[in-house]
Amino acid sequence: SGVERLGDMIAEAKTIVPFTGAGISTECGIPDFRSPGGLWTRYRPIEFGEFVASQEARDESWRRRFAMEEVFAAAKPGRGHRALASLYRAGKIPGVITQNIDNLHQASGFAPEHVIELHGNTTYARCIGCGQAYPLDWVKRRFDDDGAAPNCTACDEPVKTATISFGQMMPEDEMQRATELSQACDLFIAIGSSLVVWPAAGFPMMAKNAGARLVIINREPTEQDDIADLVIHHDIGETLGPFVAN
Ligand code: OAD
Ligand code: ZN
């Protein structure tokens, strides 16, 4: 079966690089983007340019974030996260590349420097001008007091979740490290991503072109199933659960 082949490939690999999307966190209660009920079936994304240009867009963006706070605060690593953390502790995974912003790889035991966050992190905020970090509590208090999304106390530019929005520059350092990891592994496993958002979606192919074997684990078919060595159209928790070390 697919899971047995995956087990063999994991056993044979020296260096495994996982690449994760929202599907790894759905069992943790966090909705994905493009499945039925996903975020982009309910909301239109607020692009970076709109956020910069409009106080109304910033207020709406923060209202959406606060509405999700209980979900993010309660989320615990799922079986997929825990399986990857087990392989990381076993020395097989030098780092995980993620499109996720939920901090759950860190929560599962990855050192922060081994989580490459291509789309940032939603568990804290940053000034888009000077980069000053702010806790979400601070933003919430200011929002409640002023009735509007706050600006930076240092430079007066808008404060945004520390995530990458459509239209925003990709983080250079993370892109560089993701490139190095993709080119240096012998097994690359894309987990829970529709693989439609670029440049993130370029890493599976980059790994494949550099000689890695490519596995895709996703309930639905993805754009890149045809270039994979193994495709598992199955639930992530069930597929990776057997790799959680006790
Ligand atoms: P998507 O919502 O596009 O894709 C998630 C995939 O996971 C879907 O194809 C689901 O079928 C699959 N899935 C969900 N739960 C699963 C489960 N339990 N088992 C197996 N498969 C499951 O999410 P991403 O590909 O992560 O970026 O989205 C990429 C980017 O688009 C995000 O990082 C975000 C979004 O816009 C930005 O906002 C910049
Ligand atoms: Zn600032």
Image (tube, rainbow, N blue to C red):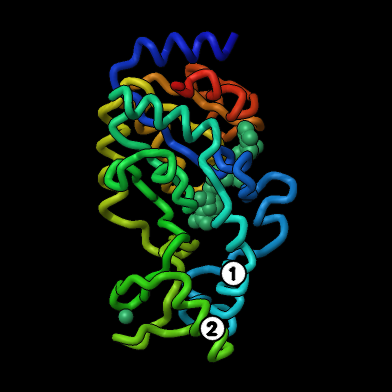
Check the image and name the residue furthest to the right: 36
Where 141 sits versus 76, above or below? below
Which image quadrant is residue 234 in?
A: top right
Q: Secondary structure at mark 2?
A: helix
Quadrant of the drawing holding the N terminus: top right
Give the number of marks: 2
Q: Are marks 1 and 2 in contact (CB under 8 Å)?
A: yes
Which kind of residue does numbered mark 2 sit on? Phe
Q: CA distance from mark 1 to mark 2?
A: 10 Å
**Is the residue indicated by label 2 positioned so its CB lies within 8 Å of ligand 2?**
no
**Label 2: how many Cα within 10 Å (few below 14, some 14–19, many 20+):** some
Depth check, front residue: 73 or 98: 73
Which numbered disc, 1 or 2, marks the residue that appears first in the sequence? 1
Q: Would you identify the image quadrant in which residue 91 lies?
A: top left
Q: Write down the residue under mark 1.
A: 66
| In the displayed structure image, the side of residue 128 where residue 28 appears, left or right | right
- Farthest-out residue, bottom: 146
Q: Amino acid at mark 1?
A: Phe
Residue for point 36% across, 33% down: 206
233 left or right, relative to 129: right
Could you tell me residue 154's position as x and y percent? Answer: 29, 86
Determine if the C-beta at disc 1 is less than 8 A from ligand 1. no
Give percent across and percent down for residue 108.
43, 39
Q: Quadrant of ligand 1?
A: top right
Residue identifier under label 2: 143
User: Residue visible at 69% across and 44% down?
Assistant: 35
Whether residue 196 appears in this view of the structure is: no
Q: Is residue 72 visible?
A: yes
Counting from the top left corner in percent of width and height, residue 171 is at 33, 57
Quick check: 135 above or below 199? below
